[in-house]
Amino acid sequence: PPPPLAGCGGSTFDDTGGAAPAPGVPPDASPTPQRLDVRLGASGPAETAAVAAAAAAWGAASGTEVVVTAGADGARPADVVTVRSDDLAAAVAAGSLTAYAQDLPNADDFQPHLRAAFTLDGTFWCAPKDFSTLALVVDQAAWTAAGLTDADVPTTWEALATVAGRLTTEGRTGLVTSSEYRRLGAFVAQAGGSLVDADGRADADSAEDLQALTYVQSLLAAGSMRFAADVGARDGAEALATGRAAMTVESLGAVQALATSSPGLAVRVLELPAGPGGRGTLSFTSCWGISADSPERDRAKALVAALTATDQQLLFSEATGAVPSVTSAADGFRERFPERAAFLAGADRATTLPNLPGVAGVVDRLDAQLAGLATADAAAVLARTQAELDAALDG
């Protein structure tokens, strides 16, 4: 099967689950019980329970036994697997997936940037499961102690620099993030830059990308921003939870984790500010991939249609905290979860990591360089990344 989800498409951090019966019965359903195996990648117990409940409800209506397992291993080959957007190219190249998403009744309901994430060479391969963008997560107590108000909510890079400075105290840094591109790439998006342009060409060695890294370097030099490893934290969320950060750039999954691990920490989630290129953020997602080797592809497609139905996606949001992948669930999500609205607000200006072959390895090597960004030659970092992307995309 294709590579499994690795924790970027919506994390889960509570043990409640729920599902509504979803029809979606394939036209050839018969009284004879059939079986589908669904493999979730890096799934938490809440997501596993919620998907199992929804699948069982659909299975009862369709005469299908659906077995949901979490992790890479299973007793049988999976019919349906979760696939990260940046793993799509490898799965397609391996011949592991069936292209089916365009045939779904709700194919046009998926968020446009999610459709793009799972489209290769004009083919919409698999249905987006859910997603999370990056947002600015703020320690509300630190914000208040610094004398900041709603009027200070940063909407520009300049304002973010000012607020980060005011929030920096002895022992606490205003802004702490991990150094990986999966976080710093939000600044690239805000500068109007990218690693790969809309035509699939390498675009790392651009003025916009350099402007983004130079801005991050200016915050690091001012001492109002530090990387998580430099404050002894695994990531920005841990730095926030331990009082070593006043703000971080993180996903909805991290906020859900904080609610469990640090219930006394009051956080506020804000949209990321605009840079020279406007507002921008990164989005992380996975899809329901249907195995090319599955003998029950039509039945699997019907199950996916049920799992991505509007009401079912809102039930998944209640169980896991993830943002629904369909636009028809947007209003319901905002009404039920106003504290998470900033993550949904970023959807229309979000980009995902490039899904083209070879790019994932380049991003991994870029991460190693970004760890030393404070003292690095940013232009040289981008030039090296450009050369590697050119080689990967031309290969």
Image (cartoon, rainbow, N blue to C red):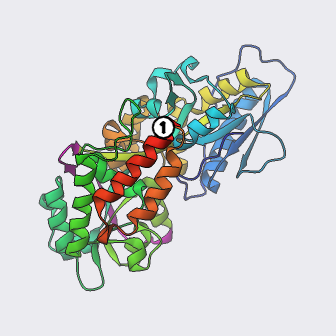
Image x and y of residue 368, in percent: 46, 64
User: Quadrant of residue 111 in the image?
Assistant: top left
> In terms of secondary structure, where does tag 1 sit?
helix
User: Quadrant of residue 307 in the image?
Assistant: top right
Whether residue 139 sits left or right of residue 306 in the image: it is left
* Total count of labels: 1
Q: Residue furthest bottom?
A: 170
Q: Residue furthest right?
A: 32
Taking depth in this image into account, of 175 and 199 the one nearest to the observer is 199
At 22% from the left edge and 73% from the top edge, which residue is drawn? 221
Taking depth in this image into account, of 289 and 34 the one nearest to the observer is 289
Whether residue 33 sits left or right of residue 56 in the image: it is right
Vertical side of 230 occupied by 95: above or below:
above
Quadrant in which the N terminus is drawn: top right
At 26% from the left edge and 71% from the top edge, which residue is drawn? 220
- Is residue 272 one of those drawn in magenta? yes
Amino acid under disc 1: Leu
Taking depth in this image into account, of 242 and 186 the one nearest to the observer is 186
Image x and y of residue 28, in percent: 77, 14
Is the residue marked by circle 1 packed among few (<14), some (14-19), or many (20+) residues within 10 Å? some
Q: Residue furthest top?
A: 27
Vertical side of 62 occupied by 188: above or below:
below
Residue topped by disc 1: 393
- Is residue 125 one of those drawn in magenta? no
Taking depth in this image into account, of 324 and 112 the one nearest to the observer is 112
Report whether residue 133 is seen. Answer: no
Whether residue 62 sits left or right of residue 365 in the image: it is right
The range drawn in magenta is 261-278
Image x and y of residue 214, in percent: 23, 60
Image x and y of residue 178, in percent: 40, 65
